[in-house]
Image: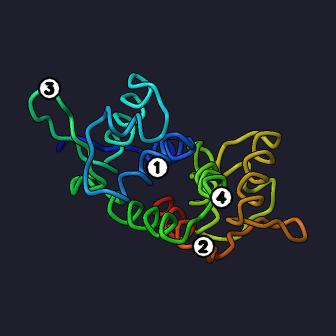
């Protein structure tokens, strides 16, 4: 697992799934569980749970340990995956605050495309008009509008008087996602 280098947009795609969040929340509740017990605890078939757990593990958000014929999972970040510890901590905070899964999914979907990360990084340098932003990011105006609208709808950007700029999110997970996008 030392060679893991998950991208933020792929990590956000993993987090944009209610079943995966249910599994993660279950792991926050207990120290560790084998895959079969995790699947049963949230009403998933074992092959589906196994697939979801592998996705979370590949992003460095959980750890897996084989013991005999069983694989035990824990909500422990992979120390070799940049941002995994911070993201997992903010996700645990969402769990402790009983945040609805829909809210977590909505925040994560702001960064489920690499172009949105490019937009955020470009806007971090300076606010930009639509035409300038399109040229700097090399994104067509139509696609740019859709991506900026998604960022705007989720509280990461705003468009005022023809200028697009980053906003300062207040939600802890949103702050962590924005910091990861800018890293």
Q: Which residue in the protein does label 1 denote? A: 8
Q: What residue occupies the far top of the structure in this picture?
A: 47
Q: Is residue 7 above or below residue 167?
A: above
**Residue under label 2:** 171
The reply to whether dot 1 and dot 4 touch (C-beta < 8 Å) is no
What is the quadrant of residue 114 in the picture?
Answer: top right
Gap in angstroms between the C-alphas marked 3 and 1? 32 Å
Q: Rounded to the nearest whole Å, what is the CA distance between mark 1 and mark 4?
A: 18 Å
Closer to us: mark 1 or mark 4? 4
Image-based side of 177 in relation to 83, left or right: right
Q: Position of residue 116 (x, y in %)?
A: 63, 50
Specify which label sits upstream in the sequence, 2 or 3.
3
Point out the frontmost of discs 3 and 4: 3
Residue corresponding to mark 3? 69
Q: Earlier in the sequence, mark 1 or mark 4?
A: 1
Q: Name the quadrant of the N terminus.
A: top left
Q: Residues within 10 Å of mark 2 (few under 14, many from 20)?
A: few
Image location of residue 143, percent across then percent down: 76, 40
Of callouts 3 and 4, the N-terminal one: 3
Q: Report how far apart the C-alphas of labels 2 and 4 lie in the structure.
A: 10 Å
Residue located at (62% from left, 77% from top): 170
Q: Which mark is residue 55?
A: none
């Amino acid at each position: 697992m030392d060679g893991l280098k998950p991208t933020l947009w792929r990590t956000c795609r993993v987090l944009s799934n209610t079943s995966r969040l249910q599994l993660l929340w279950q792991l926050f509740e207990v120290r560790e569980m084998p895959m079969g017990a995790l699947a049963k605890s949230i009403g998933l078939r074992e092959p589906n749970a196994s697939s979801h757990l592998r996705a979370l593990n590949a992003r460095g958000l959980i750890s897996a340990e084989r013991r005999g014929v069983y694989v035990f999972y824990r909500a422990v970040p992979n120390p070799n995956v940049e941002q995994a510890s911070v993201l997992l901590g903010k996700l645990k905070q969402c769990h402790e605050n009983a945040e609805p899964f829909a809210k977590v999914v909505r925040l994560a979907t702001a960064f489920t495309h690499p172009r949105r990360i490019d937009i955020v990084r470009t806007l971090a340098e300076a606010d930009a008009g639509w035409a300038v932003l399109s040229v700097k990011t090399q994104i067509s105006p139509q696609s740019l509008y859709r991506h900026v609208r998604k960022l705007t709808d989720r509280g990461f950007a705003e468009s005022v008087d023809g200028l697009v700029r980053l906003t300062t999110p207040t939600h802890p997970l949103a702050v962590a996602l924005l910091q990861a996008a800018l890293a």
